[in-house]
Amino acid sequence: MTKFIFVTGGVVSSIGKGIATASLGRVLRNRGFTVAPLKLDPYINVDAGTMNPYQHGEVFVTEDGAETDLDLGHYERFMDVSCTRGSSVTTGKVYQKVIEAERKGDYLGGTVQVIPHVTNEIKRSIIQLGAEQEADVVIAEIGGTVGDIESLPFLEAIRQMRKDVGYENTMYFHVTLVPQVGPWGEIKTKPTQHSVINLREIGITPDVLICRSESPLPEDVKEKISLFCDVPIRGVIESLNVETIYEVPLKYEASGLGDLVVERLGLEERPPQLEEWTKLVHTLKEPTYTCRIGAVGKYTSNGDAYKSINEALIHAGIPNDARIEVEWLESDIFESGEDPIGLLDGVDGLVVAPGFGGRGIEGKIEAVRHARESGLPFLGICLGMQMAVIEFARNVCGLVGANSEEMNPDAPYPVIHLLPEQKGVTSKGATMRLGSYPCNIVHGTLASDLYGTSRITERHRHRYEVNNDFREKLIEHGLVISGVSPDYRLVEMVEIAEHPFFVGTQAHPEFKSRPNRPHPLFQGLVEAAVTRKLKASVR
């Protein structure tokens, strides 16, 4: 029978439930168990697709085209799994299904209520995910904090799950803060106690407390937490800040958490396989080289807006034995008239990130121009690739005023235009070209060398594409079309042959990168950047 672990959070938001959930999944994966991660989000949006990145961070896209919370990215990266639409459940999605069922008469005229109809739909989603993925364990993270009014239906649903599937098949984890206050940095357990009290008032008694703390918890503090929160002392798990988030699963394993979960849920006892994970963490902490990558984006003031790109760059440093330092640059600064040489001084490679809308676009184009002309290793992602095509059209092909229809519908040379199937689409939610699509890689190109195959799949999230009316013009002037859709209708990747590393992709390769399997495009970029830095140091 599938086992269920539920992860809640208390005291403050952004406490690290996502990393805790992902790390717990990695602990179980290291033992060979099949894990299905799930995010239960209390917001009323049906999905994250229409959310502002300044407010909510990046939108993570699954293989089957769901636009989800960024925590699903953590799950995929840590657990090396592929999430699905079923891995993300929101209040909006739940109520949408309940209302649709009511309209069809499925409730036989009964009064539709939060209990049992809404909670039943939440439970159905949880159980269905486990069945669909044939999971040994479903790990479900509940967004927000205990005490949030919008979280109550989800908390009630997971409370009922213990009655439905049995004590022996459920565990409750609670992530909480143990702060230090006063001039002597005294450790205080009262916030954790009150958070657990709130949880118990709802009817949930945690089995494990993940205690976020800035310094190690003395044994007497653990005993106090255990006593007042009614949690076994071996279930009081200290969670300190670490040099790299990928070290957290190893810390959990060292604390005995893996053994505790296996024992408590009656899972088969298996020795953890830690060699691969230990090795990659060691490389992240003690690399031979350091490499600085500039990343130009439109939403860099929110550190989570490009979370997957940041992590993909870090992953790419592992096989290159390099620590990656990412310098985030707002694209607007390249529109100030300042020479890009000064703005990009000291970076060894450049990523131009995705985005929407016209703000900062000319700045992105200027950054691309500098990378192309100076030989700076470059990777353009989605909008970043489109800006690379516009820059090439303007400055190499001589198409003055070339632009995207998104930015200028009346551009004299619309080298980027709206996908034909997007014309007439007015609804914003879940209407883009979303999810995994195949791509044919052209033999003899850099992309072919990087991927090592002629057929790939990548995840997409866009409405605009390269305009085929200008494809031949771009090719004539040296832009290499290195990846196309199987019907050759869509340009998926471009590159410049004589450049050390200049690649643009319409896809979002960052979503498929893993610490144990870095994405080849990012790995190639970092390799080129390290090579450039080493050559410069020799001079």
Image (cartoon, grey):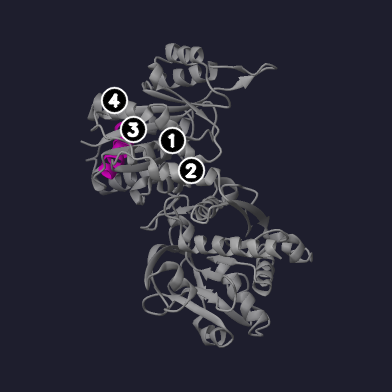
Question: Most prominent secondary structure in the magenta stretch?
Answer: helix
Badge 4 element: helix
Q: Earlier in the sequence, mark 3 or mark 1?
A: 3
Residues shaded magenta? 114-130
Question: Could you say which disc has been placed on residue 5 in the image?
Answer: 3
Q: Given contact means CB atoms under 8 Å apart, are the residues at marks 1 and 2 in contact?
A: yes
Q: Position of residue 438 (x, y in %)?
A: 37, 69
Query: Which residue, given by chain and number where applicable, does mark 2 sit on?
Result: 281
Query: Which residue, given by chain and number where applicable, does mark 4 sit on?
Result: 264
**In front: mark 3 or mark 4?**
4
Q: Earlier in the sequence, mark 3 or mark 4?
A: 3
- The answer to which quarter of the image holds residue 216 is top right
Q: Earlier in the sequence, mark 4 or mark 2?
A: 4
- The answer to which quarter of the image holds residue 180 is top right
Query: Which residue, given by chain and number where applicable, does mark 1 sit on?
Result: 250
Q: Where does the N terminus fall, quadrant-wise? A: top left
Q: Residue at x 38, y 26 (%)?
A: 256
Badge 1 element: helix
- The answer to which quarter of the image holds residue 292 is bottom right
Q: Position of residue 177 (x, y in %)?
A: 53, 25
Give the spatial CA distance, label 3 vs label 4: 11 Å
User: Which residue type carries mark 3?
Assistant: Ile
User: Which residue type carries mark 1?
Assistant: Leu
**In front: mark 4 or mark 2?**
2
Q: Position of residue 337 (x, y in %)?
A: 79, 66
Q: Where does the C terminus fall, quadrant-wise? A: bottom right
Q: Earlier in the sequence, mark 3 or mark 2?
A: 3
